[in-house]
Amino acid sequence: MLREQAPDCRVLILTTFGRPGYLRRAMEAGAAGFLVKDGPVEELAAAIRRVLTGETVVDPALATAALSAGPSPLTARECDVLNASVDGATVADIAARLHLSESTVRNYLSSAIGKTGTRNRMEAMREARQQGWL
């Protein structure tokens, strides 16, 4: 991990994926900044300088969206099950990978589908990724 190898290193994430969940996860991981890369280059340069002086820099519009979005509704296990289904795996495949029963996998998938307001596990996975929950 970067933090272990270079504890004084400050990380500023520059991304095209300006989603509240991604911001939250980046900050929880210790990032010093998070910007969407469609901003002016002058703002990026200023943000780099600010991060180097110890400040935390976050895209204001994204910060507002993150505050209004709230935390992920998915449990850690629901995320595990959705991640395990990424390659089109069957319920039996997911159960074997995660050492769960097939009925438990179905319960987690059903819960994740309900929480994401989608119709099936592939839509649930896609929505969870778009929100930055996975």
Image: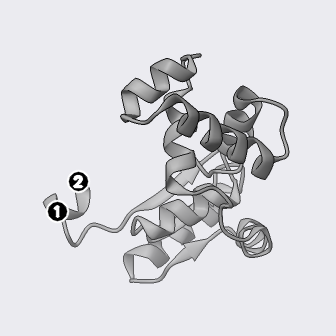
Tag 2–tag 1 contact (CB < 8 Å):
yes
Which amino acid is tagged 1? Glu
Which amino acid is tagged 2? Met
Q: In this view, does 10 lie above or below 36?
A: below
Q: Is residue 39 above or below residue 118?
A: below
Q: Where is residue 131 in the image (x, y as percent from the top left)?
A: 71, 50
Q: Name the residue under label 2.
A: 1
Q: Where is residue 50 in the image (x, y as percent from the top left)?
A: 48, 78
Q: Position of residue 71 (x, y in %)?
A: 66, 68
Label at residue 108: none
What secondary structure is marked by label 2? loop
User: Can you name the residue that lies furthest to the left here?
Assistant: 5
Label 1 environment density (alpha carbons within 10 Å; few <14, some 14–19, many ≥20)? few
Kindly identify the residue that appears in the image at 24 percent across and 63 percent down: 3
Label 2 environment density (alpha carbons within 10 Å; few <14, some 14–19, many ≥20)? few
Residue 82 horizontal side relative to residue 9, left or right: right
Examine the image and state in which quarter residue 103 appears.
Answer: top right
